[in-house]
Amino acid sequence: MPAVARGEIVCCAVFVLAGCVDKGEPEYAADQFVDAYFRRMDQQAARQFTALGATEMLDRELDLTRGVRADGYTPAQAAADVVCKRLSRSARGERVRFDYDVVIRHEQSEDHRAADIELAKIQSAWRVVRVDVKTK
């Protein structure tokens, strides 16, 4: 099966599973952020699920990519074959952390990343407040 078709199947499964998650739960905000940021490489779309430090991080990235985007290079063109899998959840005080495994497939290689996504409830909504990504 071609890599694109596999990616489409995985993405469909993620969206079906995301449909089962209550939109008021931190899992929903974390999964939506991860989908926009890693899979679609769309910082603007990911920004709506952030606050505090994560918003500042995305604002810096948007500033850095503004010139490229103005020339017509879209998030869809930047997107790669990316599979994200939520691995674990932990709580620390009023914050919730999720660990994700992120696999980015290129033509002849794969990059593996570990993403640590932390959320806080801000004005009665869960928002991503910290993002830490490491190469595996």
Image (cartoon, grey):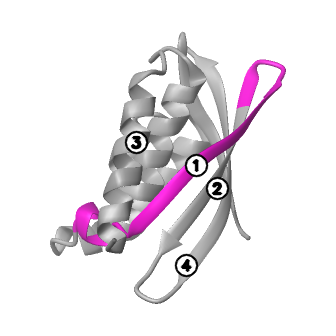
The secondary element bearing badge 2 is classed as: strand
Which of the 4 quarters of the picture holds residue 73? bottom left
The secondary element bearing badge 1 is classed as: strand
Magenta span contains residue 80? yes
- Majority secondary structure of the magenta segment? strand
Q: Check if mark 2's residue and mark 1's residue have beta carbons within 8 Å.
A: yes
- Of 132 and 136, nearer the camera is 136
Distance in Å between CA atoms under marks 4 and 1: 15 Å
The secondary element bearing badge 3 is classed as: helix
Distance in Å between CA atoms under marks 2 and 3: 16 Å
Label whose residue precedes the other's in the sequence (4 or 1)? 1
Say the numbered circle drawn on residue 101: 2
Quadrant position of the N terminus in the picture: bottom left
- Label 4 Cα neighbours within 10 Å, binned few <14 / some 14-19 / many ≥20: few
Q: Which residue is mark 1?
A: 85
Q: Which residue is mark 4?
A: 110
Which of the 4 quarters of the picture holds residue 26? top right
Hey, what amino acid is under mark 1? Lys
Hey, what amino acid is under mark 4? Glu
Distance in Å between CA atoms under marks 4 and 3: 21 Å
- Of 45 and 108, nearer the camera is 108
Q: Which residue is mark 3?
A: 13
- Of 99 and 64, nearer the camera is 99
Which of the 4 quarters of the picture holds residue 52? top right
Label whose residue precedes the other's in the sequence (3 or 1)? 3
Hey, what amino acid is under mark 3? Ala
Label whose residue precedes the other's in the sequence (4 or 3)? 3
Quadrant position of the C terminus in the picture: bottom right
